[in-house]
Image (tube, grey):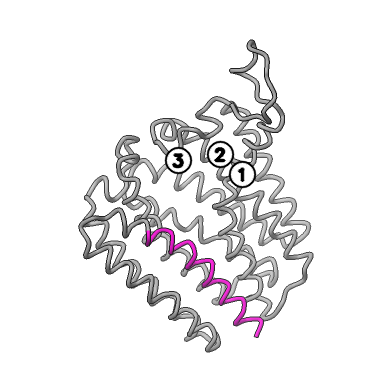
Amino acid sequence: MDGDGDAVSTATAGAVARPPGIVRDLVTLTKPRIISLLLVTTVCAMFAAEQGVPNGWLILWTIVGGYLSAGGSNTINQVVDRDIDAVMDRTGRRPIVAGRISPVAALAYGLVLVVASVLVLGFLATWLAAVLSLVGVALYVGLYTLWLKRTTIHNIVIGGAAGAIPPLVGWAAVAGDITFGAVLLFAIVFVWTPPHFWALALMLRKDYSQAGVPMLPVVYGEHATRVQVLLWTIVMLGTTLLPYAAGAGITYLVGALVLGLPFLGMAVMLWRDDRSRPWAAITFHYSLLYLALLFVVIAVDAAL
């Protein structure tokens, strides 16, 4: 049981978490490390929409609303997927699976976060941003978690649309509308998702197989997955050049190439190496850094 080190009575030790442990579990349910990357894409999209530096208060409230939205989605996801999480090594200690928070309480918590996110974004940013955040929740929980994840190898290709919503939210918070520039940012995250997630799936193939999740390496094997990672990386690299064709500056073009070519090189090495795990791990971890830095380049180019 999580706690602050103080003793708990024997009668309640298995059922009641002390307040510090409860707070920690509630934060854990939101998956803050994952949300941090989503917020980077959100805020950098705000710079792109502003073509400069957005209002500081608007940035703050958009971050708050974005965190609440993604945190609510992640919490509800863990309620739905608690049976899968229970048989996967990396997720077996999550609060719901471990019995520290009940599914009903977690569901209520997740829904409260989602409602709060809509109110924060609607009243303190724009209502379009609020609606888009709600669309992201619907895509992640309804399309990906409840349907695609358990039924098709294309789960993260189609479901990747949910992770590509945050740049739209950031753009809408500043501009109040969605233009071609926002669509390009959405497209970049959308095509980044397959090579990123399939690299992770190669690392966790055993876990997904045990849980019965039809991820690509489970159904079609590691070679097919390595090929797909390479192909999607090529598509991704091409997509990241589109903003320059649409008017982004030379700073963006140089940054996109400097960041993208190593990604392509890693995908090639993963494709060529039969020992998938080492290069899968390298590719996966670089993909996280890559997306964050690419969006920082987008923001810097817009500010300049």
Residue 297: x and y, percent?
56, 77
**Which of the two residues, 5 or 165, is positioned nearer the viewer here?**
5
In this figure, which residue is indicated by the disc labeled 1? 72
Closer to viewer: mark 3 or mark 1? 1
Q: In the image, which residues are magenta?
A: 282-304
CB within 8 Å, label 2 to label 3: no
CB within 8 Å, label 3 to label 1: no
In this figure, which residue is indicated by the disc labeled 3? 146
Among the two numbered marks 2 and 3 on one chain, the one whose residue lies closer to the N terminus: 2
Quick check: 194 left or right of 248?
Answer: left
Among the two numbered marks 3 and 1 on one chain, the one whose residue lies closer to the N terminus: 1
Residue 301: x and y, percent?
60, 82
Residue drawn where x is 65% and y is 45% of the image: 114
Residue 295: in magenta span: yes
Kind of residue sitting beneath label 3:
Leu
In this figure, which residue is indicated by the disc labeled 2? 76
Q: Quadrant of the N terminus?
A: top right
Kind of residue sitting beneath label 2:
Ile
Residue drawn where x is 44% and y is 53% of the image: 159
Q: Secondary structure at mark 1?
A: helix
Q: Magenta residues: mostly which secondary structure? A: helix
